[in-house]
């Protein structure tokens, strides 16, 4: 596992290489325990795959955060 601090928070990244041309990348937010998984091209650099997985994790965390906000009622 490694960490990616490009987003201002720690992200744990785990990479599982297969015998084919793909790699399974898991990114985990250690604070919330939120986990995302993606499959990438094994010919891509490890740094790029980590960045993409971290971006996906940030997207999911932002989506969850926005879903929890109460909507302003006009009534």
Image: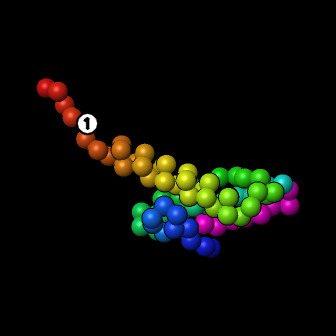
Residue drawn 68% across the image and 58% down it: 49
Circle 1 sits on which residue?
71
Quarter of the picture holding the N terminus: bottom right
Residue drawn 25% across the image and 36% down it: 71
The image shows residue 74, relative to residue 61, as above or below, that is above
Name the foreground residue: 36 vs 45.
Answer: 45
Taken as a whole, is the magenta stretch helix, strand or loop? strand
Residue drawn 55% across the image and 51% down it: 56
Left or right position of 67 against 70: right
For residue 72, which quarter of the picture? Answer: top left
Looking at the image, which residue sits at the far left? 75
Looking at the image, which residue sits at the far top? 75
Name the foreground residue: 18 vs 12.
Answer: 12
Where are the magenta residues, as a range? 12-20
Left or right position of 68 against 54: left
The image shows residue 1, relative to residue 15, as above or below, that is below
Q: Secondary structure at mark 1?
A: loop
The image shows residue 10, relative to residue 62, as above or below, that is below
Does the magenta portion include 29? no
Quarter of the picture holding the C terminus: top left
Percent of width and height locating residue 47: 67, 64
Percent of width and height locating residue 53: 60, 56
């Amino acid at each position: 596992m490694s960490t990616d601090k490009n987003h201002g928070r720690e992200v744990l990244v785990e990479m599982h290489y297969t015998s084919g041309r793909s790699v399974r990348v898991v990114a985990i937010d250690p604070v919330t325990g939120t986990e995302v998984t993606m499959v990438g091209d094994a010919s891509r650099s490890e740094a790029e795959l980590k960045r993409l997985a971290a971006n996906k994790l940030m997207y999911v965390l932002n989506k969850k955060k926005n879903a929890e906000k109460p909507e302003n009622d006009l009534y």
